[in-house]
Every structure is written in structure tokens, then in C-alpha cells.
Amino acid sequence: MIEIFTLAFLMLVSIASVIAAFKAIIEKDMVRAIVYSAIQSAMYALIFYVLMAPDIVLVYIPVSVGITPAILLFVTKKTERYDGD
Amino acid sequence: MKKSEICVIVSIIIFIFSLAYITSLGGLGYLPPVDVRKLAQIYLSSTYNPFEPTNTSSGYESVTAIVWDFRGLDTFFETAVFYGAIIASIAVYRGVEIDTRKKPIGMSPIAKTVTRLSTVLIPTVAASIAFHGHLTPGGGFQAGSVATVVIVLIVMVFGLRKVILKGLTKPKILLLRSLGLIGIGLTAIGLVLAGLVIGVNAYIFQNQAKPIARISYPMWVDDILVGGSLLLFNLFEFIAVTAGFALVLMLFSIEEEEVRKVIK
């Protein structure tokens, strides 16, 4: 029972991460794309936690939700916010 | 729906299904695993084993034991590569001065109050991850990246000039980073130096006593498991990683006009 629950949870989180990744790719506003990318990373962190890798979770959350969006926001500020065709 | 969006969806689906197919073909076995593998058994039995003092690390946490004891030299070179990247970014931004006479621009009082609370909470969590790295999941790099988040928050909410006016300047952070790296190096060769002084054999990156090197870092201090060199490595890595990330993020947050004056 617990295994089915684990796999179902993993599937749900994976699908959510795929949707967030798709939204991040097609988004024209870079700031919103960065937020979608952070959501995708948070989903990955949940997957790592369920797959028993707490050390990776502890480094993945600050790097992918804190530091990477910060660097990307600084870069966005120095370049263009909207992606043109 | 546009053509490019359909292309993105199709390529995501192909990527996911090919990954799933390769995983189902490969020898990963039943996922998630239900039994402890042979290799994991070896690591678990040699991480903390008081009955076999010459074949053990000194903490409860296998990952920290692997990272800083079993393969300490690899981790040292990873740290060195990280410093190479930071030194490169400092070299790109050389000579860039920040005009501290201008007034710092910050966000709203709500954001500032929340950030003031976080400047106490986040470093506390980071310190607990670093100091318990040999007992619970965590370690120096994890703690350092958690502590960097608070510096990102302060730079974004209060502004870079405020941080510099408060005394957190580039030379000071460079000094902290160098102290962390020197600490890691000294901990690595600590037992060799001690062995030279008292005239016994010892290895670099040695933590506990080995059959022909009967010298070790203290494992217990007053009934507290301190984990020998693991605690020292975690502490110095915490300082070094925090200072390194903070330096790079502070350099990135300098306004482009100031950088353009120097880099053309």
C-alpha cells in the first residue's frame, strides 16, 4: 500500500514539474519564467526527499529556489525582461 | 496553439518516455529499492563502528563520512574548482568601485521587517546544518548555500550600498573565504604535522587511527560525538562556501553603469 502511495505521489509531483518546465519554456516574461523554474525545482526537491536523499534536498532547495533565481533576476535586470520573437 | 509550443510539448514527451524506457531497461532493479545494497552495507558498517576502531569514520552520517573522509581528496579538489570559478569572476570585476555616497535604495518597510527576522532565522538553520553535519543529513556545502540565501535577501531588499556601509566589504569577505580554505588545508594535513612532531606515521586526510598510523582526531569530547575531522571540515567549508557565494552575488548585483566605467 505504502509503495503504491509513494509511486502515485512521485507521479503527481513529476507531472507538476513537467507542467512548470513547459510554462517556463513558453513564457515570454523572463521574471515569470524564473518563478516557474523555481516551482519546477521545488517539485524536484520533493522527489529527492521521497527517494531518500535528504543531503541533496538540503543543498538543492537553497541553490535552485534561492541562488539561481537571484542570479537570473540580476541578469534579467541587466538585459531585457521580455522575450521578443 | 503555435507551432513552437507543439514542438516543445512533443520534445518533452519524447524525452520523458525515452528516459522512462532506458530506466526500465537498465539494471537499477526494483524502484524504489526495498533492501540495502552490498555497497551500501559496506559504507554503513564502516561509517560508525566502535568495535572496529581502525576501519571506521567517526560520525553517524554516511554521506558526510564519504564526502570528507573516504574520498576527502576529491572533495578538496571540488572545493578548489569552486574557488577557481570565484577567482575568475573577481578577476572579471577587478577595479569596479561602488559609489557609497549615493543613498541606498531599498524595498518597502514590510519587506525590510520580514528580512530582518530572516537574518536571525536562516543563519541559525545554516549553523545547525553545519554543526550537525556529522550526525544528521547536511554538511558544510549545504549550510553554506542556506546561509547565502540571507545575503541574497539583504542585498535585494536593503540594497548593496547599505551592505557595504554596514562594513561587509569585498576585502573582508575575501579574507573570510581565504580563512575557510586555509582551515580546510590545515585540517587535511593536521595529523601529518602532529605525526612529524611526535615522530609517528600519519597520512593526509586521515581522520581515525589506521593499523600503521596510530594517531587520530578526537572522536568524543565530553560525551559529545564531535566526529574528529568531519566537524572541522564542515565548519571551514561552511565559512568558505558562504563567503564565496556572497562575493559572487554581491559582484553580480553592482549596477551596469558602474561596471561599464571599468570594463569596456
Image: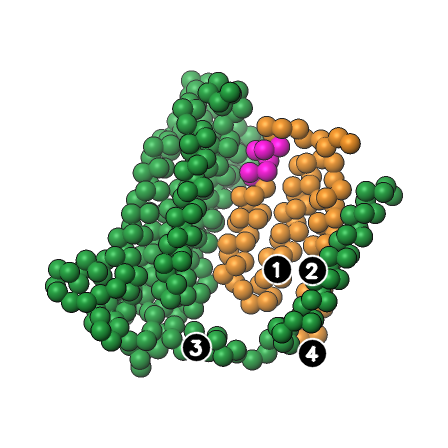
Chain colours: A orange, B green
> For mark 3, what is the residue?
B42
Q: Position of residue B95 (x, y in %)?
A: 40, 24
Amino acid type at circle 4 is Met
For marks 4 and 2 on the same chain, the one whose residue lies earlier in the sequence: 4
Please say if B59 is above or below B233: below
The 10 Å Cα crowd at callout 3, few under 14, some 14 to 19, many 20 or more, is few
Which chain is mark 2 on?
Answer: A
**Viewer-closest of B108 and B174:** B174
Q: Are marks 1 and 2 in contact (CB under 8 Å)?
A: yes
Q: Is A71 contained in the magenta span?
A: yes
Same subunit under labels 1 and 2? yes
Tag in front: 2 or 3: 3
> For mark 4, what is the residue?
A1
Q: Is residue B50 left or right of residue B157?
A: left
Residue name at image x 70 percent, y 71 percent: B24
* Measured Cα–Cα span from mark 3 to mark 4: 30 Å
Which secondary structure is most common in the magenta stretch? Answer: helix
- Name the mark on residue A13: 2
**Viewer-closest of B215 and B137:** B215
Residue name at image x 36 percent, y 37 percent: B173
Q: Residue B164 lies in what quarter of the image?
A: top left
Same subunit under labels 3 and 4? no
Please say if B226 is above or below B89: below
For marks 1 and 2 on the same chain, the one whose residue lies earlier in the sequence: 2
Amino acid type at circle 2 is Val
- Name the mark on residue A12: none
Please say if B185 is above or below B159: below
For marks 4 and 1 on the same chain, the one whose residue lies earlier in the sequence: 4
Q: Are marks 3 and 4 in contact (CB under 8 Å)?
A: no
Q: Are marks 4 and 1 in contact (CB under 8 Å)?
A: no
